Image (spheres, rainbow, N blue to C red):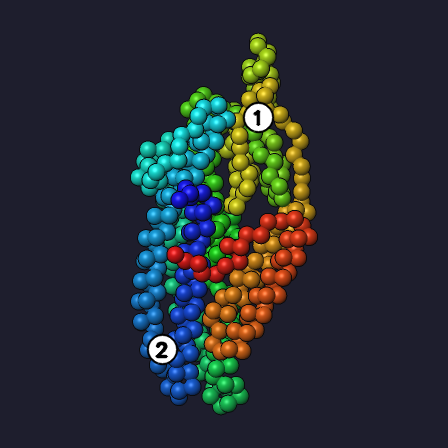
Amino acid sequence: MAAPTVDDLVTALLDLYTGVEQRLARDISVRLQAGLDSPDWAQAKLQQLTELRTRTQRILAKLGQDSDDRVRQAIALAAQRGGQQALRELHIQAEAPLPDLARAFEALPGIGALVRLARELALTLRSTHTQILRWTLDSYRDVVARAALPEVLLGVQTRRQAAQHAWEQLLDRGVTGFQDTAGRRWELASYVEMAVRTGTHQAMRQGHMDRLTDAGEDLVIVSDSPRECELCRPWERRVLSLTGQAGRVLREDEIVDDRIVAVNVVPIETARAAGLFHPNCTHSTSLFLPGVTKVDNAVSNPEGYEAKQRQRAIERHIRRWKLRSVGALDLVAKRKADAKVRYWQAALRAHIDEHGLKRLRYREQVGRAR
């Protein structure tokens, strides 16, 4: 069996959370459909709130246990991969993959920083649980209340139609309200992916930096990432100092003996404070060796960035309609949702072909929880 990659573990964590969202949507749908044409439907539904709360809390408790285990594995593997990359840059044979990432966590270099990263990521993911529980209960109550309005009972609109309409609106909104440190708001799937990718990338960079500084190296160069954003664009192919040096520093040429090279450097923390390595940032660093590393010009690609953002928007539409399909209260609504899924999937295929992008099917999925 092949060893897991960091992307495998990121996807597994995302699966856990999107799977819970789908599971709860299906659960609410089934509960709302039961006895929908009965005169005492609204009263019976509200009496089930305690049961729904208990079931949701049980699901979230299991989710917390599963996600904590995967967080430790993801952070450990990312740190190890970053360390191995540094060893390769130092022309040192990288060690074999660790057999048990969870147990090996404490043996990794920079354990203090890695424990902090793992704890922060675990807490970030657990912070979504309150919002998930609140969305579940509020959505259920709201649908029941709106389906029991006087105009419904007077026959202007059937209870089933009112419930379907109210439920669709709530499904479209989904579990939202998550806010990152920059004040941006996210839906559940996007927020979880952002948090996990940010945490694992930080761990990878930490492992990389720890290995380099242990070897006495200080300078790294920023990658030229395709489809970069405005925040990162000024930092591509810039030389950064891991120890906080700034300005013009002198270093020995790694090829020509007795030759001194002047290098303009910026502290890595300065670059980070200016926006480099922001949430979902795709940039990395590699060892800078004077006289060896080529400091070429970065290639800006703002059009590619916009194309990538459009891809993310289409993926959100696909997830939205898939969730509607799962939570549909009648066959007509389900068929409409399925047709919309096919429409947006066709739009995604056309967009990917036009811009030469990579299709990430897991980003279109709602509910592949293990």
For the residues labelled 2 and 1, the Cα–Cα distance comes to 64 Å
- Could you say where residue 202 lies in the image, as x and y percent from the top left? 46, 39
Above or below — where is 156 with respect to 303? below
Whichever of callouts 2 and 1 sits on the residue coming sooner in the sequence is: 2
Nearest the eye: 327 or 168: 327
Nearest the eye: 118 or 10: 10
Q: Residue furthest bottom?
A: 154
Which amino acid type corresponds to the residue marked 2 in the rendered image?
Leu
In this image, 177 relative to 348: left or right?
Answer: left
Q: Quadrant of the C terminus?
A: bottom left
Q: Quadrant of the N terminus?
A: top left
Q: Residues within 10 Å of mark 1 (few under 14, many from 20)?
A: many
Above or below — where is 346 with respect to 122? below
Q: Residue at x 38, y 39 (%)?
A: 76
- Could you say where residue 292 lies in the image, as x and y percent from the top left? 59, 21
Nearest the eye: 276 or 64: 64
Which residue carries the number 1 mark? 265
Q: Residue at x 53, y 62 (%)?
A: 319
In this image, 58 relative to 211: left or right?
Answer: left
Which residue carries the number 2 mark? 46
Q: Residue at x 47, y 45 (%)?
A: 7
Secondary structure type for disc 2? helix
Which amino acid type corresponds to the residue marked 1 in the rendered image?
Val
Secondary structure type for disc 1? strand
- Could you say where residue 72 lies in the image, as x and y percent from the top left? 36, 44
In this image, 79 relative to 325: left or right?
Answer: left
